[in-house]
Structures are given as C-alpha cells and as structure tokens.
Amino acid sequence: TSKWARAEAILRELEDKCSTPIGKLRQVADAMTVEMHAGLASEGGSKLKMLISYVDNLPTGNEKGLFYALDLGGTNFRVLRVQLGGKEGRVVKQEAEEVSIPPHLMVGSSHELFDFIAAELAKFVASEGENYHLSFGRQRELGFTFSFPVRQTSIASGTLIKWTKGFSIEDTVGEDVVGELTKAMERQGLDMRVTALVNDTIGTLAGGRYYDSDVVIAVILGTGTNAAYVERAQSIPKWHGLLPKSGEMVINMEWGNFRSSHLPLTEYDQALDVESLNPGEQIFEKLISGMYLGDIVRRVLWKMAEEAAFFGDTVPPKLEVPFILRTPVMSAMHHDTSTDLRVVGTKLKEIFGISNTSLRTRKAVVEVCDIIARRGARLAAAGMVGILKKQGRDAPASAGEKQRTVIAMDGGLYEHYTIFSKCLESTLSEMLGEEVSKNIVVTHANDGSGIGASLLAASHSQYL
Ligand code: ADP
Ligand code: MG
C-alpha cells in the first residue's frame, strides 16, 4: 500500500479510538459524579481526592486593605499586590509580576525552590510604591496559591501529597508547604505571614465570586487541569469537624487524577503515561491539559513517520524527542487559516526539521491536532457536566425558580486555544440541552486565582 493509504489508516484508527459521541460523554459525566460521591464519602474512597479546602465563605466584596498573593503552579510563578477598598472601593489597584522557574529548581531540593521564590517575593515587596497602604503596625499578609495536591490541615496549612506537572522534589512531599515558604521568607528577612493556602481552582472560584455572586464552579485548563466547586457541608460524610455556619464548603476535586473505563485511551496515551514522571496517575489531565496535548500529537506523527514513511524514507529524529512539540505550537498549527497552511509548514520545519511538506501532509497534521484537541475539550465538558449533576444544576430549575450558574474558567489553554474552548462550550450546550444551557454561563476569570488568593488572605487576616 502507498504511504497515503497507510497514513490514512493510522488517522482513521486514531479518529475512531478518540471518538467521544454524546453517549460516551454522558458515561464520563456519570462516572465523574459517582467518583465525587465516593471521594466525599471517605478518605481514599476514590481516585478523586475531593480535598476539603477549609474555605467555607467566599468573598463578599467587603474585603479591605493591602494584601499579597503568590501563585506557584506551573512553569511560572506570579506575585501580586492588591489594595482592596471594600464595597465601594473594590480593587483600588493591583500590580503583578511573573517570574519563570529555572527548570533545575523543579527537580532539585525543596530548600532551593522555596528560597528562590521567597527571594523573588522579597524583591517584589521592596518595590512597593507609596500608593499602597498597609495599616499601621500590621504585618504584610499573603494568600499562597499552590496548585498541587495538598491535604489541608487548616485554611493556612497543608501537606503536599505529590508533585504533578513536571515538578519532582522528593523532600517536599509530606511537608507543610506554608511552613516551607515561611522558613524561606525568614531566611530572606521578609516579614510576611501566609493567612490562606489555596489551590488555583479555589483562588479562581473566590476571584470569580467577587465579581459575580452566581459563581459556584471553577475550572483550570492550563499546564494541568483541575476543578473546584461549592458543596453543601452536610454532603461531605468524611468531614468530621463542626459544620460551618455558611453550610457550605469549597471542594478541590483534583480532577486531573480522574480515570474511568469510559475514557477513550489510545496506544499514544498509554505510552505517554508510562514514560511520564507519574505513571498511572493524572490520567484525565494527560488527556486534556496543555502540558500533554502537544506530546500526544507528536507521538501520532512519529508513528505515521515510522509506519507510513509519512515524512520521507527516514524518520526525522526530532520526532522522538519527548515534549519537543509544545501545545502552543500545536495550537498555532491548528489555527492556521492560510490556504497553503504556511504556519504548519514553518512549524514542522522549526520544531522537527521537516522541510518541503506538501499541502496534503500539512492537512493531515492539522487533522491530528483537531482529533486530539477536540477529544480533550469534549472530555473536559463532560467533567463539568458531572459537577453540575452533583450540584443538581444539570436539569431545568423547578417552575418559578430562577437559577443561574456561573463557571469561572482560567488557564492558558482555555484562554489561548480558541478551537479548544469553543469546542468545550458547544459540547456543554450539546450535553445540557438548550433550556439548561441558557442559564449556565462560562466566564473567563482572568487571573482570578491571584485576586482570589488575596481576597481569601484578607478574609482570613490575623487582624479580624
Ligand atoms: P499554569 O497552568 O502553568 O499555571 P497558565 O494557566 O498560564 O499557567 O497556562 C499555561 C499553559 O497553557 C501552557 O503550559 C500551555 O500548555 C498552555 N498554553 C499557553 N499558551 C497557549 C496557546 N497559545 N495555545 C495553547 N495552549 C497554550
Ligand atoms: Mg496557573
């Protein structure tokens, strides 16, 4: 058979194995709801950790004063200061800075990583202008967004369960990450107290709620993926503490670790998982999030090169390099609207050293991107429907009742990969039907997590 026929066969098989018809998506959504119940019932009851965040009150708008936030969760970390002016003033002003984490620190020692972070934070604090006002005699307070699975022990403490997203630092696992940061701040001579430790999903939920009181779910689609939502405190059997006055508790699902026999997994996903830093874990994340989508595409192209000589008689060696194709590049190729798919041609040359590709070849590459991106987006939508079901918000409200549901979304993948986000939103409507979906709003909470963490730092201030 010809190169084209063999390549076509690989593509059709990929399409078939990755297909997500509505019936399958409903099974995924149902499985998500079932696992949510199990994870809430008992510790270790599910792959979904359903972590209790200790956030039982979301921002009201009354928060006031100068607060800091620190966001660590991917390749960059961000520091933020915000002057909150209460109901009238709202966010009076804010300033943020982003610092990339030197890769060797992601796999080094805990001490070095936190020293680096504390040093950058100290520099940022030192640059505070005169238009920011800390009340007299007060210590600076910080909301720490730490987007890895943490078992919280209070609103401002928690131990790291495991690293994800390419971080791997043995000596942090099992430690209180607030303790680690606090000690590093002391070493830097920085006088600051962490008053809230949150996950980026919790931060996004809090930030979203500050601007819209109907926000009840937050989803992150960035390097990794995760979701948080507002649960009724009495629906958490594993919670043995006092029931909060609000009757509510925010749950950090850690949904990246979801897995189910209904997930459409391929040989490419299996290989990616086996070769990853965390085999067997974060299976949902590995199908959906920005860290992995590009690498799945690379693996398909590699197979096409090996088995169909798709890029010539020899296999371009760079196709074998893990993570050489990043998701932003995949996205750029997927969004190429030029008639000769010029961007695809350029990227294939730049990334893999494959030159002189024909239009037909480029089209096939775009098709691979399309299959992988749509599968991820549709599965993410199914996960969201699972949460809505758990909250009883997936069906029309009873007569006379007005129920608006807002989902705050954030993350670079959602923000920049337009085909992905459009597909996610249309899949939500497809699954929920017209009547329900008109009351469900998906909003982009741009850096909601930073603002959210500072709002939670404010509402858990030592001076209240
Ligand atoms: P993090 O998740 O690391 O906290 P972000 O929310 O900013 O950070 O997300 C960054 C991730 O978003 C990147 O790792 C990448 O996978 C994805 N991303 C960024 N830009 C794009 C893009 N243009 N197209 C697709 N994905 C993108
Ligand atoms: Mg982030």
Image (cartoon, grey):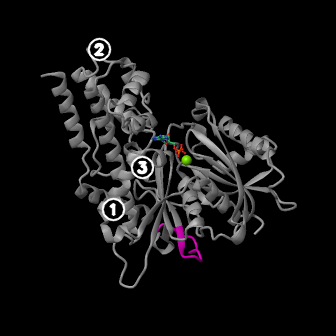
Q: Could you classify mark 2 by the number of other residues whose Cα lies within 10 Å: few (under 14), some (14-19), or many (20 or more)?
A: few
- The residues tagged by marks 1 and 3 sit, at their Cα atoms, a distance apart of 25 Å
Q: Residue furthest left?
A: 1
Number of residue marks = 3
Residue at image x 26%, y 50%? Answer: 20
Toward the viewer: 148 or 228?
Answer: 228
First along the sequence among labels 2 and 1: 2
Residue at which label 1 appears: 429
Q: Amino acid at mark 3?
A: Asn
Quarter occupied by residue 27: bottom left
- Element type where label 3 sits in the image: helix
In percent of width and height, residue 389 lies at 36, 67
Residue at which label 2 appears: 314
In percent of width and height, residue 285 lies at 41, 46
Contact flag, marks 2 and 1 (Cβ < 8 Å): no
- The residues tagged by marks 2 and 1 sit, at their Cα atoms, a distance apart of 45 Å
The dot on residue 257 is 3
First along the sequence among labels 3 and 2: 3
- Element type where label 2 sits in the image: loop
Q: Amino acid at mark 1?
A: Ser
Quarter occupied by residue 462: bottom right
First along the sequence among labels 1 and 3: 3
Q: Is residue 67 above or below residue 249?
A: above
In percent of width and height, residue 374 lies at 32, 46
Residue at image x 59%, y 40%? Answer: 76
In percent of width and height, residue 231 lies at 48, 69
**In the image, is 435 to the left or to the right of 75?**
left
Q: Residue furthest right?
A: 137
Q: Say whether residue 30 is visible.
A: no
Magenta-colored segment: predominant secondary structure: loop
Residue at image x 36%, y 62%? Answer: 385
Magenta residues, as a range? 237-249
